[in-house]
Amino acid sequence: MRSLYKVLIMISVFLCGIFVNSQETRKITVDEVMGLVLKRNAQLSVSEKKVQIAKQNIEVAKLQKLPTITASTSQFYLGNSFIIQKDFSDVTSIKLPHYGSSYGVQASQLIYKGGLINKSIEVAGLQEKISEFDYLKDQQDVKLNAINNLLEIYKINNQELVYENNKTLAVERLNNIKKFYQQGMITRNEVISGELAIINIEQGLVVLKNNRKIINYNLNILMGTDTTTELLPVQVFDLDAPSTLKDQQYYLQLAQENNPLSKSYKTNIEIAQKNIEIINTDKYPSIAGFSSTSVNKPLSSGNPILDAYSGGFQVGVSVSYDIDNLFKTKKRLQVGVLQKEQAEAGSKLIEENIAMDVNAAYIRRQNALENLKILEKAKVLAAENYKITEAKYLNQFAVQAEMTDAQNQNIQTELDYVNAEIDVLYQHYTLLKSTGTL
């Protein structure tokens, strides 16, 4: 029974090893992440389809320039006719050819309606521009999301290194504490404190590893790659993230020129203006050319009625005008003007929102740079304090509480510095995204 149990354990370990080894590890840069996102991201695929639909709608709108051509036919049974005396005293039946049919072709072409067709095509073109701006906006959102995930993985990897290094130091210190305890120089609670410090570090490592699994999965989804692939960010700090900022006005001007949301709202104003022009076309008559031809049987215009076809054709111009437009158009124009005013107000509002986003991103980027410099000093001081306190502790000049405080400070400042490095990059990209140039 024990032999079977050992065999099962060996098989389980072997299978687990295969599973672990089967997980692919992929080194990846920010440029590669953004390239994959632009090619495979599901959200961008949806947005791209919207652009294609908008382009096709332009072609559909152009179809209004083509003539309308209709062909028709009817086949029917024709019963006998009858004549009834006016006093209903007698009924006379007249035989007719019983099979009747007709064939016809009609064509019409709108010649003039105040430019209605061209303006409709222009509106479709503007709607295509909006779909393209929406696509660019989605690109910016997805790029920043992907970069944030990649930087989070990089940050977690660095945090793990910090924890592992401190765990190594904590284990060495615990070994020294145990020696002192065996020599009767310290009490048991000193050993317990050292063991608890290692447990806390191990708990932090478990949290980091699970967080990395979540973010790794999400980033693979964003890139459209296998979710089991373990991603390893490389060349993160080779990115073009300058340590100094240009004037804030520069970024505001950049946003006014490039932010796709701003362009989209400005295009809405153009569409509203075109809609007003389309409403105004109701003030003009419709002029259309037409032609038609048809053949019918039986021939019923003579006596007797003949089982033969008669036909003819006509060509002409029709002019029509809806008189009710004289009072209806004014009301519709009022709605159109209000819609344009609404679009203008919306554009102004979005410009203000973009300005606020740029301002906030600019200040956060500035704060991230300043924070990094401060934490760099704190990191050096905490490391120095840790070495001094450790030396004092090993020489019995410091108690365990002081050693624990020094270790916690050292770990925290190292973690804060790693986070600050990543935050500088993230705030840089957030600032670019707010301007629409990511």
Image (tube, grey):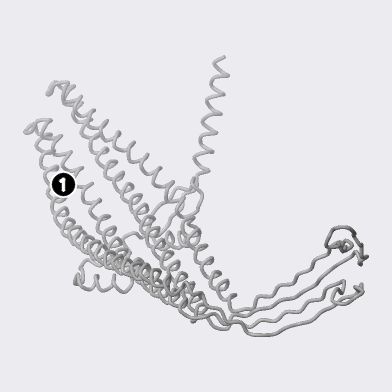
Q: Amino acid at mark 1?
A: Ala
Q: Residue at x 27, y 55 (%)?
A: 422
- Taking the view exactly as shown, the residue that stands out farthest to the bottom is 316
Provide residue 109's location: percent of width, then percent of height: 62, 80
Q: Is residue 194 depicted above or below 220 in this figure?
A: above
Q: Residue 151 sits in which quadrant?
A: bottom left
Provide residue 331's location: percent of width, then percent of height: 38, 69
Q: Residue at x 33, y 47 (%)?
A: 157
Q: Quick one: quadrant of the C terminus? A: bottom left
Q: Residue at x 37, y 39 (%)?
A: 210
Q: Residues within 10 Å of mark 1 (few under 14, many from 20)?
A: some
Q: Residue 29 sits in which quadrant?
A: bottom left
Provide residue 342's location: percent of width, then percent of height: 32, 66
Q: Quick one: quadrant of the N terminus? A: top right
Q: Is residue 298 depicted above or below 26 in this figure?
A: below
- Taking the view exactly as shown, the residue that stands out farthest to the top is 1
- Residue closest to the eye, 143 or 95: 95
Residue 13 appears left or right of 273: right
Q: Residue 166 sits in which quadrant?
A: top left
Q: Residue at x 91, y 66 (%)?
A: 96
- Residue closest to the eye, 287 or 190: 287
Residue 101 appears left or right of 435: right
- Residue closest to the eye, 100 or 210: 100
Residue 281 appears left or right of 241: right
Count of residue discs: 1
Residue, disc 1: 383
Tag 1's secondary structure? helix
- Taking the view exactly as shown, the residue that stands out farthest to the front is 87
- Residue closest to the eye, 254 or 277: 277
Provide residue 148's location: percent of width, then percent of height: 34, 54
